[in-house]
Image (cartoon, rainbow, N blue to C red):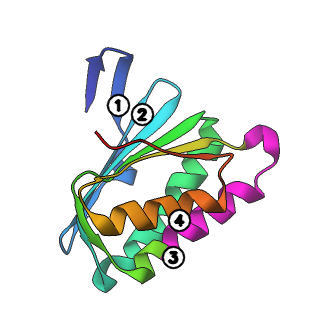
Amino acid sequence: MSDTGEGGTVTRVEELCFDQDGLRVVTARAGDHLDSRIAGVAELAVGDRLAGYLRTLHQRAAADGVSQVVVDLAQLEFMNAVCLRSFVAWIQALQELPRGKQYRVRFRPNHQLPWQRRSINALRCFAADLITVEAGG
């Protein structure tokens, strides 16, 4: 699926999209960045699938030389600790890239959900130079 938006062409990346056990992930390429929308509930049943998704997202971002990955969590109602650890592993893999190959990660959390305020800001602490958390509105 391709679309032309404000910033040019937006192309859905099918291998980075899935809907499983209440978790929906849609990823698109827009210019020099990847946009990932994660919605629903991330519990134990999708832990392995989410971990695999984040590994593939990282590999794709590094191989394509994107400048940024935007992760929209506005519709993510809950994430358990197993799934949160997958995000920590992703950030660690990003930090292991050579400086010139690293990309930035920008989280768009739902600031109305207390668990997101705490957890996403904690993720930022792992790599404050690479991770941005958008302010609540």
Who's the residue at 67% across and 64% down the image? 92
Q: Is residue 100 left or right of residue 1?
A: right
In the rendered structure, find residue 122 and report the number of the disc placed on it: 4
Name the residue nearer the viewer: 124 or 8: 124
Q: Position of residue 65 (x, y in %)?
A: 64, 35
Identify the amino acid type marked 2. Arg
Find numbered disc 2 in the image and state the secondary structure of the residue it sits on: strand
User: Does the magenta stretch mainly form a helix, a strand or a loop?
Assistant: helix
Determine the CA span between mark 1 and mark 2: 5 Å
Q: Position of residue 6 (x, y in %)?
A: 32, 14
Identify the amino acid type marked 1. Thr
Determine the CA span between mark 1 and mark 3: 29 Å
Who's the residue at 33% across and 44% down the image? 136
Residue 55 visible from this viewpoint? no
Determine the CA span between mark 2 and mark 4: 27 Å
Determine the CA span between mark 4 and mark 3: 12 Å
In the rendered structure, find residue 29 and report the number of the disc placed on it: 2
Marks 1 and 2 close (CB-CB < 8 Å): yes
Residue position for label 1? 11
State yes or no: residue 94 in magenta. Answer: yes
The earlier-in-sequence mark between 1 and 2 is: 1
